Amino acid sequence: MSFLFKKIQPWWNTLFFQRTLLSKTEYEEAIKDYIHNRLHCETYEILDREQGSIPMTSFDFTKNNTELITHIGTAGGWAKPSTGYTFLSTSKKIPLLISNLKAKGKKQNLKQEKRFWFYDLLFLDVLYRTNQKGHAIFTNLFRNRKPQLIFKFLDEETNLWEDIYYILGCPKWPFIKAFFRRLF
Ligand SMILES: Cc1cc2nc3c(=O)[nH]c(=O)nc-3n(C[C@H](O)[C@H](O)[C@H](O)COP(=O)(O)OP(=O)(O)OC[C@H]3O[C@@H](n4cnc5c(N)ncnc54)[C@H](O)[C@@H]3O)c2cc1C
């Protein structure tokens, strides 16, 4: 269990949500700090660099579709708003897209399932107001819930009861506040 905990820990350490881009050096300093102080690795070589931004948003990208153009992948809003993961949802949506395309021949609006969209919306609201809470939220979750359930939830494959059990494993107040803010 502790092995798995260590393996997945880097993922939420890299969760960094920002409205505007920082300078390149600030990202590089943060990565160096992570390598030195978290991984305790002093000797390493940089072979390549990759850079990019993922739209962490619940915006409805299907609004950009037209009768003849269906955006796919990140452009189609297939990146999960709370994690940025796009490969999995793309692999699920492509077969659907193809069969719809064969059957109907035009416009496709493949959206995220409503309830997962709403969970992501609340999560982004919490991070938008208190960016530093991401680390604490996931630390809490991994202490309270099995990693299998967490990944099932993040893969949007849980049922409603599993969702409730998962949600109860999160710190309550930030999400309750975000929920009421959205409601009113
Ligand atoms: C650093 C980083 C790490 C990531 N890691 C993961 C991961 O581990 N797992 C995961 O699921 N997702 C990850 N993602 C999300 C990732 O972006 C997607 O999974 C995947 O690359 C999305 O594929 P895509 O084809 O939709 O978009 P992209 O890979 O961005 O491809 C779009 C292409 O279209 C081109 N393009 C854009 N505009 C135009 C235009 N007007 N005309 C012509 N060409 C254009 C772009 O140059 C680009 O080549 C990561 C993203 C980043 C930035």
Image: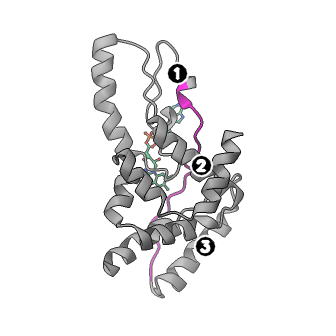
Where does the image place residue 86, in percent across and percent down from the top left?
42, 45
Disc 3, SS? helix
Q: Which residue has dot 1 on it?
A: 65
Earlier residue among tags 1 and 2: 1
Q: Residue at x 28, y 30 (%)?
A: 95
Residue 157 is a magenta residue: no
- Which mark lies nearer to you, 3 or 1? 1
Where does the image place residue 92, in percent across and percent down from the top left?
32, 38
Q: Which residue has dot 3 on it?
A: 30
Q: Work out which quarter of the rendered image holds the C terminus and state it.
A: top right
Disc 3/disc 1 C-alpha distance (Å) = 37 Å
Residue 54 is a magenta residue: yes
- Which mark lies nearer to you, 1 or 2? 2
Disc 1, SS? loop
**Looking at the rendered structure, which numbered label has been put on residue 183?**
none
Bounds of the magenta span? 44-62
Where does the image place residue 70, in percent across and percent down from the top left?
45, 22
How many C-alpha atoms fall within 10 Å of the one at disc 2: few (<14), some, or many (≥20)? Answer: many
Q: Amino acid at mark 2?
A: Leu
Ligand 1 within 8 angstroms of badge 3 C-beta: no
Q: Amino acid at mark 1?
A: Asn
